[in-house]
Image (spheres, grey):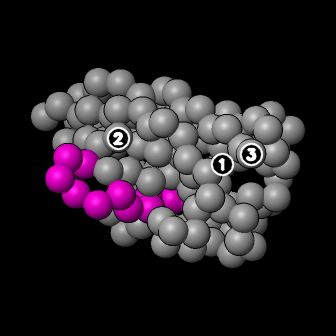
Amino acid sequence: QVQLVESGGGLVQAGDSLRLSCAASGGTFSRYVMGWFRQAPGKERVLMTAISWNGDRTYYADSVKGRFTISRDNAKNTVYVQMDSLKPEDTAVYYCAASRVTYISVLTALYNYWGQGTQVTVSS
């Protein structure tokens, strides 16, 4: 069983940056595809970015491409997302998730483990 704990959320102004971290424990971190989802009030949870087990492949949703950067440190069992040029529409709860499949998928159902979420609020 993998436990995921996110940190780094908060209240920022438009144009600011944040870095979210997700620390994993209880499993072999390097075996998992890792993703960052977000869910705004009244909306579905959607994949924003994901990274393969060794970091050689990444995915970015069009809405965050060029502004968000995902990375991972398998030695520290941690995945990060650097979020730059934040916009009010980035406001959401951000969730870290781990998937046992060997490819990056946008499907929420293919992610087996989830963190509790961290709130990101971007004011205009």
Single out the mark in the foreground, 1 or 2.
2
Range shown magenta: 40-50
First of labels 2, 3 by sequence position: 3
Check disc 3 and report the residue beneath it.
Answer: 1
C-alpha gap between disc 2 and disc 3: 23 Å
Check disc 2 and report the residue beneath it.
Answer: 93
Q: Mark 3 touching mark 1, by CB under 8 A?
A: no
Q: Mark 2 touching mark 3, by CB under 8 A?
A: no
Q: Nearer the viewer, residue 34 or 19?
A: 34
Q: Residue at x 35, y 24 (%)?
A: 10
Query: Residue 115's image quarter?
Result: top right
- Amino acid identity at mark 2: Val
Residue 23 in the image: state x and y as whole percent.
Answer: 67, 34
Check disc 1 and report the residue beneath it.
Answer: 71
Q: Nearer the viewer, residue 72 or 95?
A: 95
Q: Mark 1 touching mark 2, by CB under 8 A?
A: no
Name, please, the residue furthest toward the left: 124
